[in-house]
Amino acid sequence: MIEVEVKAKINNFEDIKVKLNEINAIKTKTEKQIDRYFNSPVNDFAKTDEALRIRETKTEKSHNLFITYKGPKIDSKSKTREEVEMKIEDSDKCAKIFENLGFIEVRTVKKNREYFKLENFEISLDDVEGLDPYMEIEIALEDGSDYNEAQDKIFDLFEQLGITDGFERTSYLELLEEQDK
C-alpha cells in the first residue's frame, strides 16, 4: 500500500473542528497512540528516511498492537511512502525480537488523535506530547496507483480548511529529536 499523507502545523484544534463540521467531515474515533521507534543495526533510518515502530492504540472500546514499516518518502511535497503494517499480540515480545536482531529502541512518541472521515480522506488531529497541534490528511492507495492526483486533492482540502502553509514532511519522531538538540 502507498500512503499519501500531508501534515500541517495548525493554530488550534477547535477552529479546525468547526471547519471540518462545515464541510461535513464525520468524526469516527478518538485514539491514544503510543509509538515505540526502532533503528536498524544495518541502515540508519534517520539517513534512509525509513521507520520501524510498534504502535499501541487505545480507544474506549479497543486495544490493539501493530508493527509498522514505513519506506523512504518518494517525493518532495508530502510524506508519501510505502507502508506495511501487521497486527501483533505482544509488544514486549516483538521489541525483544527486534533487540535480539540488533535493532535499537530510540524513542517513544505519545499522542492523542481524533479521526475524521470525508469521502476517501482520513483526517487526523494530533495532540503529540511535547509538540504543537498538527493535522494530517491521508489517502491510502493500492500499489502502482498514481499518487500525484491524490496529493493534489489533499492540498485542495487543506486550502478548503484555510491552511496554506505550515506543511511538514518530517515525522513526529524527527520533530521531537530536533527539538531536543
Image (cartoon, grey):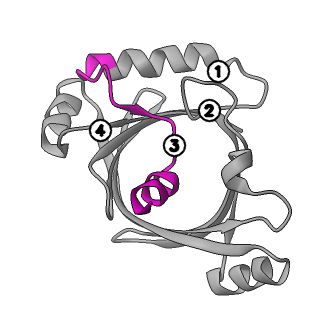
From the viewer's perspective, is the residue at label 3 or at label 4 nearer?
3
Residue positioned 36% across, 20% down in the render: 157
Residue 56 seen by the camera? no
Q: Position of residue 116 (x, y in %)?
A: 34, 41
Looking at the rendered structure, the secondary structure element under dot 1 is helix
The kind of residue tagged 3 is: Thr
Indicate which disc, 3 or 4, sits on the residue closer to the N terminus.
4
Label 4 near label 2: C-beta < 8 Å?
no
Q: Position of residue 48 (x, y in %)?
A: 74, 46
From the viewer's perspective, is the residue at label 1 or at label 4 nearer?
1
Indicate which disc, 2 or 4, sits on the residue closer to the N terminus.
4
Q: Which residues are magenta?
A: 159-181
Label 1 near label 2: C-beta < 8 Å?
yes
From the viewer's perspective, is the residue at label 2 or at label 3 nearer?
3
The kind of residue tagged 2 is: Thr
- Residue assigned mark 2: 80
From the viewer's perspective, is the residue at label 2 or at label 4 nearer?
2
- Residue assigned mark 1: 147
Viewer-closest of 115 and 91? 91
- Magenta residue check for 168: yes
Against 140, residue 41 (above or below) is: below
From the viewer's perspective, is the residue at label 3 or at label 1 nearer?
3
